[in-house]
Amino acid sequence: MFETTTVRITLVLLAVLLCGCFLSAQQKTQDPDAETMRLMELDKGMASASAATGVIAALLPHLSENSMLFPPEGHPIRGKTALSLLAAQLPADSKVQTLAWETLNAAVSADLGFTYCRYLKPDTKDYHYFATIWRKQDSQIWKIHVSVGLLNLEATSVPPLTDKIDPVGADPVVKKLLETEAAFCAYAGIHGIAAGFYNFMAEGGTALGPGGSPVSREFYAERLKKHSAANGPQPQLIWEAYQSIAATSGQLGCNYGPYVFVVAQEGGKVSRSYGYFITVWKKTGGQNGGEWRFVLDAGNRCTLPPGTVWNLEPKTGPGGKINQ
């Protein structure tokens, strides 16, 4: 009887110990704070390598063939092979262009994360800001999924982005991300750009304009006060998510695609400027409810080649319809 009881106690203690080890390991692999620190350290290491050996050499080990690299101006370079081929055609001084940046913020949810950083523009005292979306591979290694504003190459031969994700059969979270992006654009078209950004930005969120400084939700609140008394047609920003990705947690996602910025001018004319955006969305309110709000928005500029059709047209907004 004593031996049986001893065996039972030993088995129970062993089971508790194994369970505790399993939970500890599980919590360690799923700890978002630990993964965020890991991602920031990875980004800092890449910055150190860039300062020592050049941006291209620093980027290549962290790219996959699915990576999308949007320069500050221009169309995206698609993947490691494309960047390698492009780099081979560059002058020697461009290949070894060094750049050191600092990581300002980062966040992770399961297998998706982002960092945003800044660096001093060469020969100036002005900062340039850029954003990077990271995705954890099956090997548990983080790779760059999308980067906007870092790789400053004159890739004139790179074609514009025209491939669109097919929402039919897409992951339910991806569908929701696409719907939210479309609702964001529609709201901005009706109520104005500042109202759109204010209402869809999360508390503590950041928007990085093309080459501009980061702005918060309070910035758009102030813009709303100024624009409420404005008369006549207002500038319009029209965009569409061409691609989308969601974290396996269902709590974080990213959309990217083209935009057009339309400004009415005297004489009924309009000016159009083009570029690409990325929006990082976070679900508020936990697993069983809440709304999607963006925590990071960034973009670049580009020239649209003749014959390229993005079908981004102005809509009726505050002050009336912009003439086309």
Image (tube, rainbow, N blue to C red):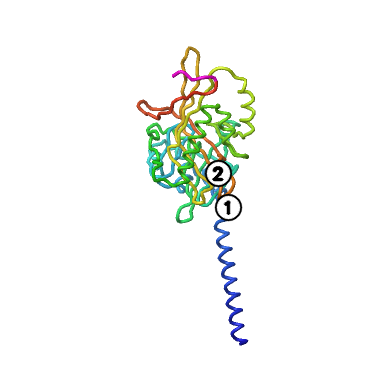
The number of numbered discs placed on residues in the rendered structure image is: 2
Q: Which residue is mark 2?
A: 282
Q: Secondary structure at mark 1?
A: helix
Is disc 1 surrounded by few (<14), some (14 to 19) or many (20+) residues within 10 Å?
Answer: some
Q: Where is mark 1, residue-wise?
A: 32
State the residue at coordinates (63%, 23%): 226
Task: Point out the image quarter for the C terminus.
Answer: top left
In 3D space, how far apart are the residues under numbered discs 1 and 2 (Cα atoms)? Answer: 14 Å
Element marked by disc 2: strand
Depth check: 324 or 95 in front? 324
Q: Residue furthest left?
A: 307
Towards the viewer: 97 or 290: 290
Q: Which residues are magenta?
A: 319-324
Q: Confirm or deny contact between disc 1 and disc 2 (CB under 8 A).
A: no
User: Residue 264: x, y in percent?
Assistant: 50, 18
The 10 Å Cα crowd at callout 2, few under 14, some 14 to 19, many 20 or more, is many
Residue occupying the far top of the picture: 267
**The N terminus lies in which quarter of the figure?**
bottom right
Residue 81, image x, y percentages: 38, 44
* Pick the front one: 95 or 251: 251
Residue 170 lies, in percent from the top left, at 41, 45
Amino acid on which disc 1 is placed? Pro
The tag earlier along the polypeptide, 1 or 2, is 1
Q: Is residue 316 magenta?
A: no
User: Is residue 33 shown to the viewer in this render?
Assistant: yes
Q: Residue at (42%, 34%) from the top-left corner?
A: 75
Q: Nearer the viewer, mark 1 or mark 2?
A: 2
